[in-house]
Image (cartoon, rainbow, N blue to C red):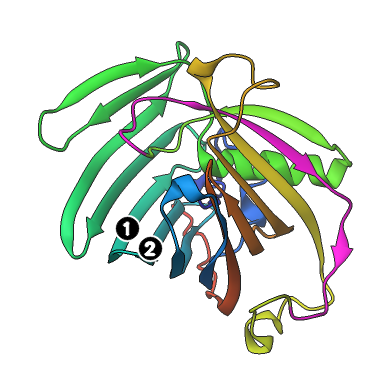
Amino acid sequence: MKILVSSLVIVLAGTVSAHAAGFEILKPHRAVYDVKLDDAEERSGIKGMTGRIVYEVSGNECEGISVRYRFVTKINTGRDTFVTDQQTSTYESPDGKEFSFQTKSFVNDTPDQKVIGSAERTAEGIEVRLGQGEKREFELEDAIFTSTHLIRVLNAAREGTVFLRHDIFDGSGDADKTLSSASVIGKPKKLDEVLDDETSEAIKGLRGRQAWPVTMSYFDKNLGNTAEATPIYEASFYLYGDGVTRQLNMRYQDYSLLASLTEFEYFDEKPCKMEN
């Protein structure tokens, strides 16, 4: 499952290198979301689901950003109950050209999948290297990484842009393809009230600040025109100007989940270390 991430800028030896403009606005933080089933079609086989997401962003504008994400769910099918555990860590370089990722998933504490790799943007596209088990190297068409994508959405929101598209590589699944994305951005609004299952303690530092309602849809590029295709995944949420997200509604092809913010804190920002 996807949660969007953030990234930063690089400064070395007192000079500014090529970087993805705007990374410095994103703030390191830790957010915890309680998850519940919003809706499920009969074909999904899901009768009930609860879970928790823990999402951490760390780093600074000199070093780049690291993201750790863990999503644990308890799923009831009516006949069985099982627990899934997905653990993901990523890093995006300050210039938006290098990306490393590691994903581990478990079902009832039994290892299910493990993917470790890195990707680099080149003039020809993206070079992907996978290092778990049988090592593989291959090239994909050009795309941006998740941190750069978030920055572009934030820049578009500030400019009043309503709709934008991008191709994205996020290292998900078997890390062997890029996805097409379409983002719809609404008008900003101030959110003072507690929403659904949020806690007042979690949102106290967010009250009175503006956030944009955003919907991001992701499509398999092999299935044809994005305008006509059904998204494989869609997420709606409120997006603050520093990259914090709130009130996530995650929709898959036959079920949807609601994730409410229950714990939140900003991390202390580490200053850039200037080299002599």
Q: Amino acid at mark 2?
A: Arg
Q: In which quadrant of the rendered view does residue 17 lie? A: top right
* Residue 122 coordinates in the image, percent (x, y): 44, 18
Three-letter code for the amino acid on which mark 1 is drawn:
Gln
Position in image of residue 179 (x %, y %) = 51, 28
Q: Is residue 252 above or below residue 126?
A: below
Q: Which residue is mark 2?
A: 70
- Graded by Cα atoms within 10 Å as few (under 14), some (14 to 19) or many (20 or more), the crowding at tag 2 reads some
Magenta run includes residue 174: yes
Secondary structure type for disc 2: strand
**Residue 258 lies in quadrant:** bottom right
In the image, 106 versus 91, the foreground residue is 106
Which quadrant holds residue 109?
Answer: bottom left
What is the C-alpha distance between the residues marked 2 and 1? 4 Å
Magenta segment: 173-194
- Pointers 2 and 1 in contact (C-beta within 8 Å): yes
Residue at 60% in and 74% down: 261
